[in-house]
Amino acid sequence: MLPVIALVGRPNVGKSTLFNRLTRTRDALVADFPGLTRDRKYGQAKYDEYEFIVVDTGGIDGSEEGIETEMADQSLLAIEEADVVLFLVDARAGMTVADQAIANHLRKQEKSIFLVANKIDGLDADSSCAEFYQLALGEVHQIAASHGRGVTQLLETALQPVIEEFVRIHGVEEEDPELEHFDEFYEEGQEPDIHHEFADKPIKLAIIGRPNVGKSTLTNRILGEERVIVYDMPGTTRDSIYIPMTRNEREYVLIDTAGVRKRKKVSDVVEKFSVIKTLKAIEDANVVLIVVDARDGISDQDLSLLGFALNAGRSIVLAVNKWDGLDEYVKTRIKTELDRRLGFIDFARIHFISALHGTGVGHLFDSVNEAYESATKRISTAMLRRIMDMAQADHQPPLVRGRRVKLKYAHAGGYNPPIIVIHGNQVHDLPDSYKRYLMNYYRKALKIMGTPIKIEFREGD
Ligand code: GDP
Ligand code: GDP
């Protein structure tokens, strides 16, 4: 499970700057859910081998009436959901009343809190930071977010407990021994004869989407109302509920982000929507079923969630819900819009459903199964090479600086999502258009749907 680091502090202390620095290697996910959170940003970041989620909570301005209320509304949920809180103060501005109010709140939390004095560039850091010890949050970590100074050390300290916990649970390295074994076969040019290990495991299916799109209705529909057992499970707002189920003799675990089992009826108080819960569900799933509301079309938030699922390499199935009672004109318009906005996940199957009436719900599972099988499929080296040769013969790679790029060898680099490794000359200079061509070629040839395919290029043989 991904650790979550929340950035907290009053406006202008440098939270966004730090956020951008931490997430710079990946696309930041700006999930602005109006009415739920104020401009909170979520990003995926990496320190060493460890991936984590960073949340920029937006500013807490000490001037509002009652800091507690303000924090409750804006940042409390983020703090509650976080494993680690970085509380930023401004070394240039010095300590303020708002800093003290935030510190008072944070001291009551049972969380790892790190006090971070930012903007130490050009200052006598030790003396400027001394006063922050009054906040009684322990060591003052000195950084300059805009220059990157002190950031690595900070992460190292802040993530230490999380890393220890991770190692305790998972053991030291998470190498896939079977894959290494696989590589030996490939090097010898033999076909690996390993059965489809995933066939015995349940498919973890996360049902995600914005509030009110119909996730609970769909979950209930899938489970069949009478089979929903209502009981309380311990957990925080960030925990999804895992529901095992069987369908056509195949086992699944629904990862229910809407909290259906906690509610007696769908109409009962709606579970507090948590972006982090959704992100974690995506991370933990094999297949992500993203539900959108036909009447709202595809919103930016939907795109953000899709982007996250894509970054995480998850298989995706899209359900356009509330397809009942729409007239033909509206349906056509929605489909056109989907085509336009969803080009970047053209591998995902789209279903038009009505969770309320049950229309189309059964067919979702055809795509879920297909996506899962595509993602975990074993593909032989011989096959990958043959397809590479065919693609190259149909449409040769371009010249780069007067020399033609040449693809020489291909083999599998992993699965879930499928990774294809291609060796050749000047492959790093291949234009994106040709990479896309190759990807589509492989997709068609291998009949892979529902999952992204990653192609890695290596220079040489
Ligand atoms: P936020 O409101 O907490 O998200 O703060 P921002 O990240 O927007 O930063 C507020 C201002 O402080 C911006 O003008 C930044 O360029 C500046 N700033 C951020 N980090 C540093 C730093 O390490 N040193 C200096 N000198 N300025 C910084
Ligand atoms: P969630 O917040 O995503 O779990 O959404 P809910 O399942 O609670 O549904 C939100 C609202 O949309 C409820 O009033 C549902 O009755 C309604 N709804 C859900 N699915 C459909 C559907 O297929 N058609 C129509 N017309 N309404 C639906």
Image (tube, grey):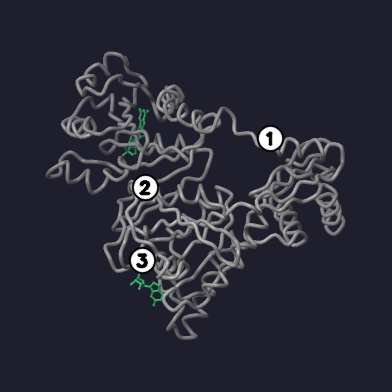
Left or right, residue 63 beside residue 200: left
Classify mark 1: residues with Cα within 10 Å, few (<14), some (14-19) or many (20+): few
Q: Give, as a three-letter code, the residue at label 2.
A: Arg
Which mark sits nearer the N-terminus, 3 or 2?
Answer: 3
Tell me, yes or no, if residue 404 can be seen here.
Answer: no
Which mark sits nearer the N-terminus, 1 or 2?
Answer: 1
The image's mark for residue 212 is 3
Q: Residue at x 29, y 46 (%)?
A: 77
Left or right, residue 29 beside residue 11: right
- Quadrant where ligand 1 appears: top left
Which mark sits nearer the N-terminus, 1 or 3?
Answer: 1
Whether the residue under disc 3 has CB within 8 Å of ligand 2: yes
Alpha-carbon span between mark 1 and mark 2: 32 Å
Q: Position of residue 36 (x, y in %)?
A: 30, 55
Q: Residue at x 57, y 55 (%)?
A: 203
378 w.r.t. 184: above or below: below
Q: Give, as a three-letter code, the residue at label 3.
A: Asn
9 w.r.t. 326: above or below: above
Q: Residue at x 28, y 24 (%)?
A: 91
Single out the mark in the foreground, 3 or 2: 2
Of helix, strand and loop, which one carries label 2? loop
Q: Which residue is mark 2?
A: 238
Q: Give, as a three-letter code, the residue at label 1.
A: Pro
Tell me, yes or no, if residue 226 can be seen here.
Answer: yes
47 vs 146, nearest the viewer? 47
Alpha-carbon span between mark 1 and mark 3: 42 Å
The image's mark for residue 177 is 1
Residue 212 lies in quadrant: bottom left
Q: Position of residue 361 (x, y in %)?
A: 51, 72
The image's mark for residue 143 is none
